[in-house]
Image (spheres, rainbow, N blue to C red):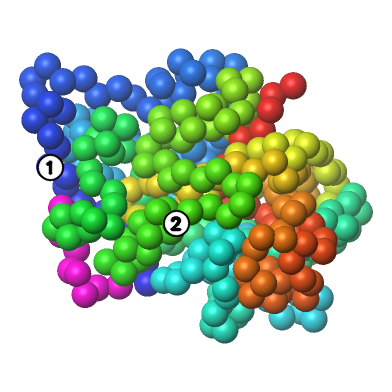
Amino acid sequence: MEFKFQHIFILLSVALVGSHAVVFSPDDYWRSVLPSSPMPKSVKDLLNPEFMENKGTAVGVGKGGVVVGAPTKSGKPVYVGVKPGADPFSYIYAAEENQIHDDPNVALFFLEKDLYKGNNMKLHFFKSSDDQASFLPRQVADSIPFSSEKFPQILDRFLVNPSSEKAEIMKKTIQECEEKGIKGEEKYCATSLESMVDFSTSKMGRKVEAVSTETEKETPLQMYKIVGVKKLSEKKAVVCHKVKYPYAIFYCHKTETTESYKVAMVGDDGTKVKAVAVCHKDTAAWNPKHLAFQVLKVKPGTVPVCHFLPEDHIVWVPKY
């Protein structure tokens, strides 16, 4: 099901729509806090010029991003989908049987030992047709309830049928944001670009850069050769995953046991990709039935577990 809200209108608070109200641009905020850190293309694609043109009255649809999938050694694609159900980036959840299938809405789990120059991986970079919601300016996002307690009000505001699949997806997103993180994890759901910047810089400092996967174009399922691997962080990083909701919300978490890499690859058709991979060094506290362990056939806490990030997910790393 496509999770789109293309023509949703939000009633803003009196303070925001008053004749003297000022709605600050999210990209202006980025430049003020991170003047020497370029904004990734994936973030720019989620900014909403339509919102600014209409002075904060409409929620438009962003351009979306590129997601990535790959098959196992047996040749059968194994994908990590984020449909109604557990989020594969939330480590407390067990995988359901129907999560291991040929679903292209994914990030693949793999082992760190496979991340080396000259290795080949069969991958598919393609445009996602759903979950293309854009950022709202913080003033607007903060005026909209985001809690299980006020869920009926949220559905009413977005004109969503309480018995619909959209309502169920929204409910699960809120619940996942309200869940406590695992031991050693600091988590936060950012409801605006500004709040994501604030959380990430509060954990990493302002000498930080945001990186995401970039590809020249959508590609078919094909072999990619790794031509370069660069470590971006030594254990410390904040990773922000875009979740399904009417407007852009990112599930961010910071741990001291995550290493991130930028992986340069070239496909058989000549397509160049700069993919971001994150490797979790300590998985001891993860659910033993988490999808990663089922895919990789390893046990919690035994080996680092890695995965590529879709284009619209972001890693915040120290800037040297």
Helix, strand or loop status at disc 2: loop
Hey, which residue is sitting farthest front in the picture? Answer: 183
Q: Which residue is mark 1?
A: 11
Q: Position of residue 81 (x, y in %)?
A: 54, 69
Mark 2 neighbour density, 10 Å: few (under 14) some (14–19) many (20 or more): few
Q: Quick check: is 258 in the magenta stretch?
A: no
Q: Nearer the viewer, residue 299 or 106?
A: 299
Q: Quadrant of residue 295?
A: bottom right
Q: Amino acid at mark 2?
A: Glu
Q: Is residue 67 above or below residue 73?
A: above
Q: Position of residue 291 (x, y in %)?
A: 63, 72
Horizontal side, residue 118 vs residue 169: left or right: right
Q: Residue at x 77, y 62 (%)?
A: 301
Q: Position of residue 96 (x, y in %)?
A: 54, 80
Q: Is residue 310 above or below residue 286?
A: above
Mark 1 neighbour density, 10 Å: few (under 14) some (14–19) many (20 or more): some
Question: Does the rendering let one see residue 6?
Answer: yes
Q: Residue at x 79, y 57 (%)?
A: 304
Question: Does the rendering let one see residue 212?
Answer: no
Q: Which residue is mark 2?
A: 179
The residue stretch that appears in magenta: 157-165
Horizontal side, residue 315 vs residue 85: left or right: right
Which quadrant holds the N terminus?
bottom left
Q: Amino acid at mark 1?
A: Leu
Horizontal side, residue 199 vs residue 237: left or right: left
Q: Is residue 147 above or below residue 75?
A: above
Q: Residue at x 69, y 24 (%)?
A: 319
Hey, which residue is sitting farthest bottom in the picture? Answer: 97
Question: What secondary structure is the magenta-colored segment mainly?
Answer: loop
Helix, strand or loop status at disc 1: loop
**Mark 1 to mark 2 CA distance (whole Å):** 28 Å
